[in-house]
Image: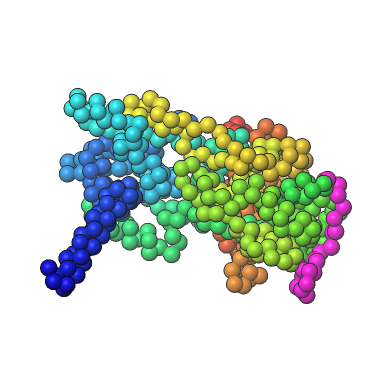
Amino acid sequence: MNKPMRRVGIAMLVMVVLLLANITYIQVVKADDYRTDSRNQRVLLDEYARQRGSIVSQFDGQVLADVTATNDKLKFQRRYLNGPMYAPATGYYSVRYGSAGLERAEDDILNGSDPRLFVRRLSDMVTGRDPRGGNVQLTINPVVQQALYNAMMSHGYTGAAVAMNPKTGEILGMVSTPSYDPNPLTSHDGTEQQQAWSNYTKDPKNPMLNRAISETYPPGSTFKLVVAAAELENGASPDTPVSNAPNVTLPGTSTTLENYGGEVCPGTTFKDALAHSCNVPFATFAGQLGADKLRATAANFGIGMTNLAIPQKVVASSLGDLDSTAALYQSGIGQRDVRLTPLQDCLLAATVANGGMAMKPQLVKKLLAPDLSDLEGFTPEELTGKPALSAANAEILKQMMEASEDNTKGLGKRADIKIASKTGTAEHGTDPKNTPPHAWYTAFAPADAPQIAVAVVVESGGNRGLEATGGTVAAEIGRAAINAQLGGG
């Protein structure tokens, strides 16, 4: 064989080897990724040939998503009951646009392909029984979910709210508004699906964004709970004296940081500073604590983690660079580069309520077989294994938060329920002084025996514009969830 022929032969051999390697990579290494890709229409068409499992609530067995039989080739169509209310939790399942949310995270159970359902699949094949997927039981309490959704929607607010059991981490409610109806996306009419998708994705209000776990905001004064925890762990007491000055100059600058409205703080102790949400003391605390202590405490509240919601991932909350004392001062009041998801903000109150230990949020209570027998249950799990503050200091901070609630205006207060809370009014935008602030409220109740923690953010002032505060806008929504969970009155 002459030299040119050898070169051609070697080149062909190399290409065959590369082709075989690529096929092996696709079919072995990447096979599962392609199979689980929500855009894989072939897999979706196969899944539609069998009955998809239901998504239900643990509290009353209420069905949140099921299927109906059809006369077309797809056989079954996904159906969402109260679709917009639960869309942030369920997500959607569409033959054209794939899946999202819980529908995607628990797809193997819902479509019946999970290895734990192998015996069931084998039995179906032997007996000729129609194959079915398993079911997912959520921790959500429909009463709390309804209260949060109605309160947000009745005002036309854009924002999010999360409620959880602080002792277990079970998510009792997760709302994002404006929301969307997933039902048109499940239609077997391609035109209807396309029209719905176009409407949702082109809407400037972005209704398909789950703001509860996929959006971060400056938390404003709700972040003072983190600073307060760090300060208590650093040896402070509720009676520690603080400055009541209306402003303080940021170290190394000529810029001043002011209390809300430029007012003098109505007290001279640490407890007074939290009750009246005075900025100067907390900015000073953050500067004195330093970046390392502040970051360590924040991390034990879960800030920076992404596996906060089982099984869905969340956007990581962050403190920013904290690269100067001036930056620490601004961060100490939840501004500058501090960004939290509403879920993370809920964890602030929940951690204090649980004696200083953050619990890992859980959205799924159980995985169930098609016959409703248990496949897997989820037990409470500590988030980091380290307390954000000691139980003794958590009790002190709880009492300080009760004083904060007593000083908070807004609707929905009940004399028979003692609440511990913190409000926040967060500046944002390129012209923050002339941009309506985000309004926050994070709380737990009953204060002495907590059953629910809640956090609410209302974007850009809600219906109060520049005059918005956490107490006048967000507090009544959080209290609505508390009242719904606790009942009575």
Q: Position of residue 297 (x, y in %)?
A: 69, 49
Q: Nearer the viewer, residue 37 or 19?
A: 19
Q: Nearer the viewer, residue 479 or 91?
A: 91
Q: Which residues are magenta?
A: 237-257
The quadrant of the picture occupied by the N terminus is bottom left
Q: Position of residue 165 (x, y in %)?
A: 58, 36
Query: Is 49 positioned to the left or the right of 242 in the image?
Result: left
Query: Residue 85: in sight, yes or no?
Result: no
Residue appearing at x 20%, y 65% in the figure: 10
Asked if 206 appears above or below 56 in the picture, the reply is below
Q: Nearer the viewer, residue 113 or 480?
A: 113
Residue 78 sits in quarter: top left
Query: Is 243 positioned to the left or the right of 347 in the image?
Result: right
Q: Position of residue 324 (x, y in %)?
A: 72, 66
Residue appearing at x 78%, y 75% in the figure: 254
The quadrant of the picture occupied by the C terminus is top right
Residue appearing at x 74%, y 49% in the figure: 230
Q: Nearer the viewer, residue 343 or 57?
A: 343
- Taking the magenta stretch, the answer to whether it contains residue 241 is yes
Residue furthest to the bottom: 254
Q: Position of residue 37 (x, y in %)?
A: 33, 51
- Taking the magenta stretch, the answer to whether it contains residue 159 is no
**Number of numbered discs present?**
0
Query: Residue 280: in sight, yes or no?
Result: yes
Asked if 412 appears above or below 293 in the picture, the reply is above
Residue 381 sits in quarter: top right
Residue appearing at x 35%, y 60% in the figure: 199
Residue furthest to the left: 1
Q: How is the image coloured?
A: rainbow
For the stretch drawn in magenta, what is the main secondary structure? loop
